[in-house]
Amino acid sequence: MSYETRPQTYDETIRILEKKDYRGIAEFILPSVKEADEISLEHTKLSVPDMREMDFLAKINMNKESFILHIEFETVYKSNAQMMKRMLRYYTYIKWHNDLPIYQVLMVLKKPVNVKNIKGSFESTVQGLEIMKYNYKVIKAYEIDKNEILSQKSIVFYPLRVFMKHDGETEKEHILECLSVVEKIEDTDYYFLTVECLKKIYQTSEYEEFVEEEIYMSSALYKEPYEKGREEGLQEGETKTLARTTIKFLIKKFGIIPDDLKESIQKLDATTLEIIIDNILEYESLDQIKKYIR
């Protein structure tokens, strides 16, 4: 069986876990939250084109204090500068939309290859004037003993145990142990998500033979793509069909058409393709088609 990852699958892992137990995520990341009077999820989508959707955002009411808890889970940590800019931009937009104190946490899942010291703060001073002090909490998942998750019964973090410290175990033993733990959970989505996390750190040959196909395939997440993926898949399928139809009609009308034009047509959106098809009888040359190519 092939365990090829759908592009959106891992990106949605945290959001699926969040739906299952968002309070459990918040309490593990910030233990004092166990005393919270109320925890409510906040909207994580930002109306900024080049910004990723935030992983976790919740409003906490605790001991007469209200604040926002923002958590990012990172597998590919490239540099301190890049991460700080991203976290600061998140902070700015959260603050803009919700004027409450913000507690930010970055959980680094995989140990960075080229960064020896992960930083979570910086200071800015100009001409002796202190402009800014900014910091967020950094949690290194790869330094957490995976058995700590079991002892705390933090089930929502079971799939992420694959990233954690496993002293005294070979990689094979580690993979088998992580899978055996979620195999016992009635909700097979946890097994599915554990396999998705394994794909992030191991080659297929290192884990595939240990996966119980019956359990993996019984998950609702395997049977049905995530909502976002399903919508994108339908849109992609519709667009591909329209592109093939457009090319077929153009060949019938003009004969052979250049390969570069075919490729450009295949990149057009569904609306544009429908316009071309609707007006196919009116075109007198391929140059009239090129006006739709940007």
Image (cartoon, rainbow, N blue to C red):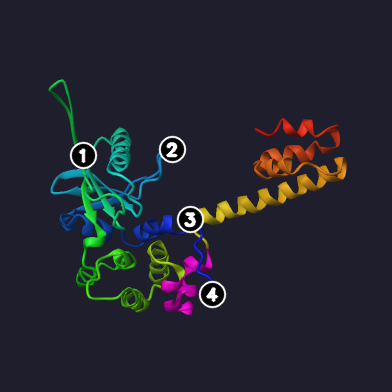
Q: Which residues are magenta?
A: 205-224
Identify the image quadrant of the N terminus. Answer: bottom right
- The dot on residue 1 is 4
**Dot 4: what SS?**
loop
Amino acid at the residue labelled 3: Gln
Residue labelled with disc 1: 101
Q: Position of residue 31 (x, y in %)?
A: 17, 57
Identify the image quadrant of the C terminus. Answer: top right
* Residue 193 left/right relative to 24: right
Q: Position of residue 176 (x, y in %)?
A: 35, 77
**Dot 2: what SS?**
loop
Amino acid at the residue labelled 4: Met
Residue labelled with disc 2: 50
Counting other residues with Cα less than 10 Å from the Cα at mark 1, is it few (<14), some (14-19), or many (20 or more)? some
Q: Is residue 104 magenta?
A: no
Question: Quarter of the image holding residue 233?
Answer: bottom right
- Mark 3 or mark 4: which is in front? 4
- The dot on residue 181 is none
